[in-house]
Image (tube, grey):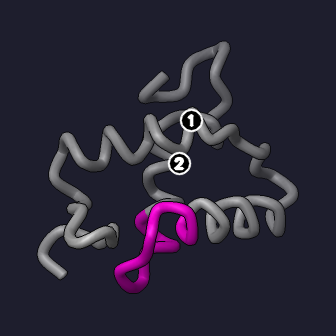
Amino acid sequence: MILPTKHIRPDRALLAIGADVLGCLREPMTVSRLWDEIRSARADRTVSAPISYDWFVLALDLLFMVKAVQFDRGLLQKAGS
């Protein structure tokens, strides 16, 4: 689930989705705006499969646990920004 396996494609692993999240998180933004950015970014790529909101939240949880993102005053931002 976190890493790709023979049953989870590399673009659906939580690390890959987390990388997409960090790539879209250029400035502090709300979770709903980030969700819209991720969906549109993944829709533009033919290789990446669409993800559900559940997978998006799990990727956010993973990023929060490894202290890659922080939530401050309703906005999500990269840690140290």
On the image, which quarter does residue 59 sit in? top left
- What residue is shown with label 2? 17
- Look at the image and say whether residue 29 sits in the magenta stretch: yes
Q: Is residue 76 left or right of residue 48?
A: left
Q: Is residue 10 left or right of residue 74?
A: right
- What residue is shown with label 1? 55
At mark 1, the secondary structure is helix
- Tell me the distance, in whole angstroms, between the alpha carbons under discs 1 and 2: 8 Å
Q: Earlier in the sequence, mark 1 or mark 2?
A: 2
Q: Residue at x 18, y 82 (%)?
A: 81
Residue 27 versus residue 24 in the image, above or below = below
Q: Residue at x 82, y 61 (%)?
A: 43
Q: Residue at x 56, y 35 (%)?
A: 55
Q: Is residue 79 left or right of residue 44?
A: left
Q: Amino acid at mark 2?
A: Ile
Query: Do tag 1 and tag 2 residues touch (Cβ < 8 Å)?
Result: yes
- Look at the image and say whether residue 58 sits in the magenta stretch: no
The location of residue 19, given as percent across then percent down, is 45, 57
Q: Amino acid at mark 1?
A: Trp
Residue 7 versus residue 51 in the image, above or below = above
At mark 2, the secondary structure is helix
